[in-house]
Amino acid sequence: MMAQGDAELQDLYRDVLVDYYKDASRQGRLDPHDIHAHGVNPVCGDEVELTLRLKDGRVDAVRYGGHGCVISRAATAMMTEALEGGSLADARRLAGAFKAFMLEGASADSLPAALEEAAALAGVRKFPLRVKCALLGWNTLLQGLDDFSKGGHDVEYQDTPLCQTGAQRKDMVTFKQVGDAVGPVKDPEIHISVAELGLIYGAEIKPAQTGDGQRVKLTMSLTSPACPYGPMLLASIHGAIAKIPGVRDVDVDLSFSPVWDPKTMASEEAKDQLGIF
């Protein structure tokens, strides 16, 4: 049973994330800009676009766009707030501290003062499939900084939802193909894309165990463990992936860890359709 103090803390953290998710003060695009980076997680559908303007070697302003779940958007909003006024070296240090917090179990006390609100993401660390959401903005930023250091001003970053084994071959199935295949599949009951609902938790692509081609394992959830349309939805997802050229085997696994929560997992567009404000 959850202690009252723990429950109150979780409620507080949720409020912090929702506040950042709704905060529009740094949303948009800077033109002109010195650094532009665009990042996507092609299976779950999270997307972020960053533009940074520099002045005297420091981040004068930063803006972000795109779409995604509350975790992805809130983490990016926290990041942009922390970046302004600092140097590019400061940006890398902040990224390192945040990634240590999310991936290595570093304590909230280890977070720099500019990222103290990121402690609200501590609960996300229990669910590796959602950590990707929190890191998308930061990984996109680091790609942008690397590109800028080499004289570039525009870079694309594509995340891998769970893992990708071996070298990428030209004939290998890509995560983008998987994302494009499952994106149009809608929940049979509420008629909203499973990707927009945040029901896709991750994917894995490996060589097929027998024969040529690839094996795709997709992990997803349902709006409820008792959803009567679950078998139909899983069959639709399975069929969509099986049609991808090069796919030989398909596994669709259900996971209810974390339990699906539309307030934190669904996209802004899906929440509008669900009447969640």
Image: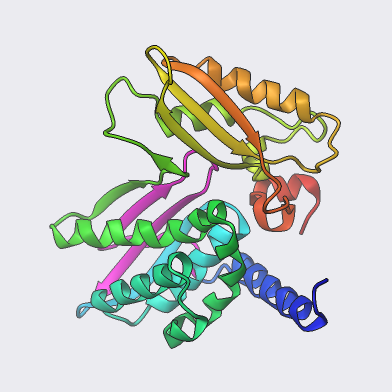
Q: In terms of depth relative to the viewer, which is nearer, 68 or 120?
A: 120
Q: Residue furthest top?
A: 211
Report the side of 238 relative to 178 (left or right): right
Residue 117 vertical position relative to residue 77 in the rendered view, above or below = below
Residue 42 at x, y percent in the picture: 47, 39
Report the side of 45 relative to 195 (left or right): left
Q: In terms of depth relative to the viewer, which is nearer, 251 or 31?
A: 251
The residue depicted at 40 percent of the width and 29 percent of the height is: 174
Residue 65 vertical position relative to residue 226 in the rendered view, above or below = below
Give, as a single range, the part of the protein colored magenta: 26-54
The residue depicted at 67 percent of the width and 58 percent of the height is: 264
Residue 57 at x, y percent in the picture: 20, 78
Report the side of 254 relative to 79 (left or right): right
Residue 219 at x, y percent in the picture: 59, 38
Specify the quadrant of the image occupied by residue 1.
bottom right
Q: In terms of depth relative to the viewer, which is nearer, 189 or 30?
A: 189
Residue 183 vertical position relative to residue 261 in the rendered view, above or below = above
Residue 123 vertical position relative to residue 87 in the rendered view, above or below = above
Residue 48 on the magenta span? yes
Q: Residue furthest left?
A: 150
The residue depicted at 84 percent of the width and 36 percent of the height is: 227
